[in-house]
Image: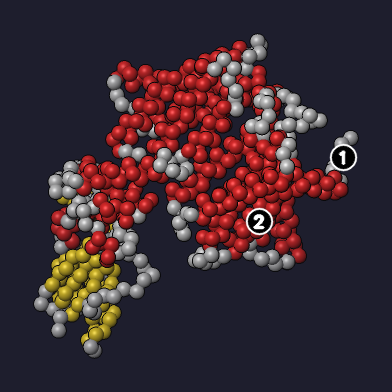
Amino acid sequence: MSRLPSLQNVLNATLKTVLRFPLEIITSIAGTVFAIVLNELDYNDPKQEFYQKVLMSSSLCLVLFLSVSLFFIAAKKSNILRYITSIALGTLIVIFVFNFHERITEIEMQQFLVLNIALHLLVSFAGFLPRTYNQNEFWEFNKQLFLRILTSALYSIVLYSGLALAILAIDKLFKVEFYNHIYLHTFFIIAGVFNTTFFLNGVPETNNSENPLVLNYPKGLKNFTQYVLLPLISLYLIILICYEAKILVTLSLPVGWVSYLVLVFAIFGILSFLLVHPIATETNNLWMRTFNRWFYFLLIPLLGLLFWAILYRINLYGFTHERYYVLLLSIWLSIVVGYFLISKHPKIKFIPISMCLAGLFSIAGPQSANYISKHSQLSRFESYMQKSNQKLTFEQEQDLSSIVSFLENNYGVESMVPYAKNKLEALLKKQKSPSYYEIMKSLGFEYRSPYDRKNDDDGSFYYYFYGNDDNTVENIHGQDFLFTLSNNTDFNCDKCTSIDGKAYSIKSKNTDYGLDLQINQDIIPLKINDFVTKNSAFRRNNNTNENVIQKIENSKYTITLNYISVNGKIEKEKKIISNYHIKVMVGIKK
């Protein structure tokens, strides 16, 4: 009969793990503390960015330290040298992360994720670099590592659920009030300290003669791969091959997202290939032997489709980070296919090693995703600026708009200034962070969103002024009173304001041309429909911070209509308004 582990055994196992991986345990505890502190900070606390970067550095250093430890333990080198190497490489990681902007950009987060993936891949083979490679041992090590990840996650989920329910029970039954973030902090401790320690306790050694790695292929994994994963991969392959045949027959261009489908198929196919590798050549596994023999051959036509799709889009629109990584993965897949087809005795460790190097290759330097994407789009921006005296077509304005939005989002408007022929300096003096619309207007063009259509004669239009903020104090520039109108309800306010001892009543009534605004006994027609039809700002999907204003005067009043939102449909070049929301400012002439 099996017994539950005693407290002494648990303490001994924990101590053994701490002594085996001291830097990793310290880093996990530090990361947990920083996560709790970060959670306690106010939303606008200036220290928030610092703690975010510390937390990101901790997560990267944890994986890096584990890779270094596996390498030095396998090489049976001095622990002092291991710690010095870990700290030196960890310092480089910290410098890398703290070079991010104060507010981390999307590109920097992408760099962080790619580096994280590369370091996790490094764990899979670091322990086999200083010793003679054994295919079965490598496979068994990564199998145990993967199962340990799943087991750690299961234990952590169960432990957290039990503790959370215990806290809840004490709260409800004994009326003990806990502080607000106790559940989240408990999660941080379980995920950061317990989960990491439990996982590290089960990391196998790669060069231990007393406890060698022996291949043990689980029957459940064999059944899952043979009867679930491989049939799905085969079905996916048939769909992609049929799509490629359709392209060749119809001579049509591949749709852009077919690149992602091919990559997903290839990556899951390689995963399946790795899962069945130890038993792929067994005589009683015809299905697996067939897959193992033909998989890389079947990837060749799909690689052709992949390169066709991504190179076509790069030729049209230049590099972005997403296209860079699709192309990089395409090249990596080609190298992997070539290696496994040419090599007589291919080593499966080539797959994680090559992918790790590809990830590191893409992070920094003149060959990185960031550098190439930035200079590609700046080059395209400069080519459009050389045509600045020409009238651009709708498609060209839409393309230039996408370039401007990409550069502004990722590198700021300052990156475009050297190429803009002195057209942005005046704008930057007025605003530090101008919108796409204002940038395009300063360049002499109109902003076209990806959702705009060349022919707005049919379909719908939508305008929303997102610069409007109900929580700000407005200066109404010498006007006397302000109110809001919409077409859903008539405005009716009897003696709602008084100026210089005179009371004012305000009413509105919908008409064919817009509405009639009545101030006391005076009726002022507001021709909203004609104004919206003639104004180009009211077009398909126009979210903007460019305010549209209509001014109307008579002998007594100056009326300013500040359009907040308008939508409707377009029929025969005429806009038919469905809804509008307008701020009205009224000035009384003296």
| Residue at (31% x, 26% y) in the render | 253
Find residue 361 and report its horizontal and vertical position in percent: 48, 38
Residue 307 found in image quarter: top left
Pointer 2 or 1: first along the chain: 1
> Does residue 90 show up?
yes
Taking 320 as reference, is 555 left or right? left
Find residue 536 and report its horizontal and vertical position in percent: 18, 54
Dot label at residue 493: none
Against 70, residue 46 (above or below) is below
For this rendering, which residue is in front, 109 or 491?
A: 109
> Does residue 451 show up?
no
Amino acid under disc 1: Arg
Dot label at residue 3: 1
Against 187, residue 372 (above or below) is above
Looking at the rendered image, the disc whose residue lies closer to the viewer, 2 or 1, is 2
| Residue at (31% x, 17% y) in the render | 249
| Residue at (68% x, 26% y) in the render | 132
Dot label at residue 30: 2
| Residue at (44% x, 50% y) in the render | 106
| Residues at marks 2 and 1, CA–CA distance in whole angstroms | 34 Å
Find residue 153 and report its horizontal and vertical position in percent: 67, 43
Taking 396 as reference, is 177 left or right? right
Taking 23 as reference, is 258 left or right? left
Q: In the current view of this chain or complex, which residue is farthest to the right? A: 1
Find residue 518 and report its horizontal and vertical position in percent: 19, 73
Q: Secondary structure at mark 2?
A: helix
Q: Secondary structure at mark 1?
A: loop
Taking 193 as reference, is 430 left or right? left
Against 521, residue 400 (above or below) is above
| Residues packed near mark 1 inside 10 Å, few (<14), some (14 to 19) or many (20 plus) | few
